[in-house]
Amino acid sequence: MPAFHRQDDQALLRELMTRNRAHRASEGVGIPFANATLARLVTAEGSPTHLRTVETLLKERGTLDLPVIEAGSVRVDGEARRVSIVAATDIAADPTVRHGEMSTMFYLRDHVQAASAMMELFLSAPDRYATEGAIGRELIHSALHLISTPAQLARFAAVVERGDTGQEEWPHISLWFDDLEAEKPNRWRNKQDSFQMLAFLVLDALDRGFIGTGELLPAHKEFLRFVVPFLRAVGFPCYESSGSWEEVAARRTSVMAVETALLDRIRGLADHAELGFLADGEDFTATVGTMVDAGLREIGRRIPFESPDYDADSIRHRRADASLVYLLMYGLPELLAEGRVPIGDSARPTTAREVETVVLDALRSLEDPATGGLIRYAEDSYQRVNFHTHEVQATVHAIKNEIKADAEARGGDMDLDRKQELRGRLTPRGREAAWTHPLGQLAAWAARRSLHTRRTDPEQAQNYREFAVRYLNRMLAGVTGENQWHAVLREDDGYHVREVPPYRVPECHVTYRDEQGNELIVPSPHTPLNWSTAMLRTALGLLTTEDHAPALGDASAAPSAKPVEEGGR
């Protein structure tokens, strides 16, 4: 390592350690809170009335702000369509801070999860969350525009025609801000679960009356019609995907879960007159049903592991993984139980609650006792100890350059296995990053399950609510407080110590370790993470719903949206 890197990093670590001495965690509901005010305010019971007080405070302090950026327009069906986006982090708060690709790229997955959160809030309390409803609709329309440009639809068509292809040939789900029409190479891991999440969200929104079919442009319908032939062409359910972590490609249970839930939703809606455009041929419903059954059986065989099909020493082998939360979020326990699908090693059908328990046990194995967050998976090297230092970043950049040069020489995709293996071996070992958004996902899932079941099974509904409040409190415990400092990358390509903005939701908690072995845990440079903010906002909102409100999922809880004229957006 160059001497100047070592000197810079030693100075960086000394300053981080010194400045953070003034910060003291505060005890609240038996766990340490970064924010002293929240520690005093939060209760273990979390009644709707009390949580509205918490929600009011966080709104006043900007914690729940979700910056929506007017990003210009893209051409869809021959006309310019205005798009609004949710960036990965608040890139406007401090323009001197660089967040790597987060500063220059739009991530469809983060945007879709934010749109879904806004929709759930509106459907739970339409009068109270009217603003969230308007934001959710705008984000859905914008995402549909971005996935339905001529270049994007051409990619769908090419994969349907030729079968599974390289990462670059898939529809682009990470877009450069100066190429929102996705006409140029994006050099990204496009084989993942993002467009599938968007398709599920759109169909869910249509099914629950949040948007109307009149709001769909012809290109939007073409995108939705591509879903089934596309998944068939790439080998659903057993093709390899980089998944939500955008890393090595593997046969992933979490991706299968999203896609199987999507196909099940298509099967249930394709016969509706207004949604007949989903069908791409004769016997469509039977074809989709066969695919759903195949997906469920493959998921049942694999639970509770993410990618168990590989040798244990393979970089693709994965047991517990935080992305398994998608099994819960997309309703797989209910689908598996209804289909009487054999589960796991026992190879016997189980109840939905038993499936939930198995998945939750796997997720609990990832809990970080020091921060309350969840690691993504064991030995995750991304944002591991000292990741945000000059030395480690020099190593990471060298790895990327080597892998990129190899791909260019071969004329193919980058070797993601090799990239992951090198990063794991050449960067410091130690504490993994502990993430916040899975806490919000679990809290929001359980809150929604509580609303679904409170009339049919009040005792189980209360269990769900208590679970949701526990995970909500753990997420609130990570909201930033005063006198916290972290290292951020600035325009000079150097790391600088900066005070963490208070009342913000970190992306994750990262660890620094000096040469004496002293460790310090601080919020990552990417604070706030808008995905995490959206999860906190929806979990908190759903838990403030009064007991007399309609059960979520009832027809009365989903007022019909006013359809706009075809092509009106």
Image (spheres, rainbow, N blue to C red):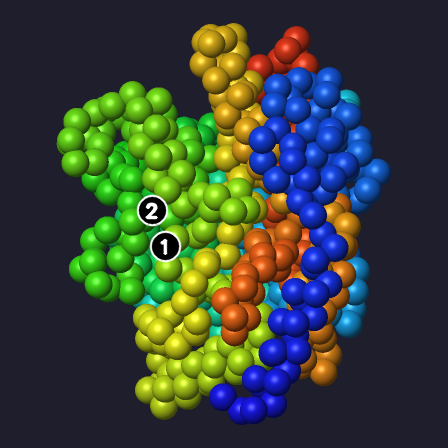
Residue found farthest to the right? 60
- Residue 562's place in the image compared with 7, above or below, is above
**Quick check: can you spot residue 211?**
no
Distance from disc 1 to disc 2, alpha carbons, whole Å, reads: 8 Å
Nearer to us in this view, 46 or 197: 46
Q: Which residue is mark 2?
A: 320
Q: Residue at x 46, y 59 (%)?
A: 431
Q: Residue at x 61, y 48 (%)?
A: 531
Nearer to us in this view, 90 or 495: 495
Q: Position of residue 234 (x, y in %)?
A: 31, 57
Question: Number of marks in the image?
Answer: 2
Q: Quarter of the image holding residue 16?
A: bottom right
- Compared across the picture, whether 57 is left or right of 5 comes to right
SS state under label 2 = loop
Q: Amino acid at mark 1?
A: Ala
Q: Position of residue 453 (x, y in %)?
A: 49, 15
- Compared across the picture, whether 196 is left or right of 312 comes to right
- Residue 19's place in the image compared with 403, above or below, is above
